[in-house]
Image: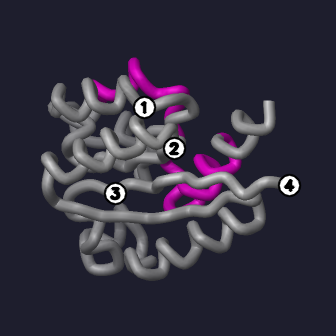
Amino acid sequence: MTVRRVLVLNGPNLGRLGVREPEIYGDTTHAELVAMCQKWGEELSLDVEVRQTDSEAELILWLQEATDARIPVAVNAGAFTHYSYALRDALAQVPRPTIEVHLSNPASRESFRHTSVIASVVTGSISGFGVQSYALALAAIASCLDE
């Protein structure tokens, strides 16, 4: 089977996993999440590269890179999910599949988290399963690529 490249992009504050509100986001660190995503990717014949930034501009540049190279993306845009139209526009250009990922379930949290401006331009959304949300997103990408 051919190994396919996938980007997993994490937005603001996700570099603080393990110490940032563990009651909401769990105690897995970002470094541990990276290793898990790479392991899950190997099992699915995916070459997974995980990146994290607190910069909206950098996240947009990474999405443009994915667009130009035709690389599928799983993205946890963090707070940018709820208001970044620039991120939404960049994500709309990325070839499918694209998966919106969240550790927690935004619909069960504060009302400002109930709206995702990126939901309308992604293939699907997975939320509320902690770090398993990433495993599910990678499985969804692999399944779409196999179709």
Whether residue 109 is situated above or below residue 31 in the rendered picture: above
Q: CA distance from mark 2 to mark 3?
A: 16 Å
- Asked if residue 118 can be seen in this view, the reply is yes
Which residue sits at x=36%, y=64%? Answer: 51
Give the left or right position of residue 121, taking residue 3 as reference. Answer: left
N-term-proximal mark, 4 vs 2:
4
N-term-proximal mark, 3 vs 4:
4
Residue receiving disc 4: 1
N-term-proximal mark, 4 vs 1:
4
Q: Mark 3 vs mark 4: give the one in front.
A: 4
Amino acid type, callout 3: Asn
Amino acid type, callout 4: Met
Residue receiving disc 2: 71
* Image quadrant containing the N terminus: bottom right
Give the left or right position of residue 20, taking residue 2 as reference. Answer: left
Give the left or right position of residue 120, taking residue 140 as reference. Answer: left
- Asked if residue 115 can be seen in this view, the reply is no
Secondary element under disc 4, as helix, strand or loop, is loop
Q: CA distance from mark 3 to mark 4?
A: 28 Å
Q: Is residue 121 magenta?
A: yes
Give the left or right position of residue 54, taking residue 67 as reference. Answer: left
Q: How far across and how far down the image is residue 147, in percent?
A: 80, 30
Q: Which mark is residue 10?
A: 3
Q: Which mark is residue 94?
A: 1
Secondary element under disc 3, as helix, strand or loop, is strand
Magenta residues span 116-140
Amino acid type, callout 1: Val
Secondary element under disc 2, as helix, strand or loop, is loop
Most foreground residue, 77 or 63: 63
Q: CA distance from mark 4 to mark 2?
A: 17 Å
Which residue sits at x=13%, y=47%? Answer: 57
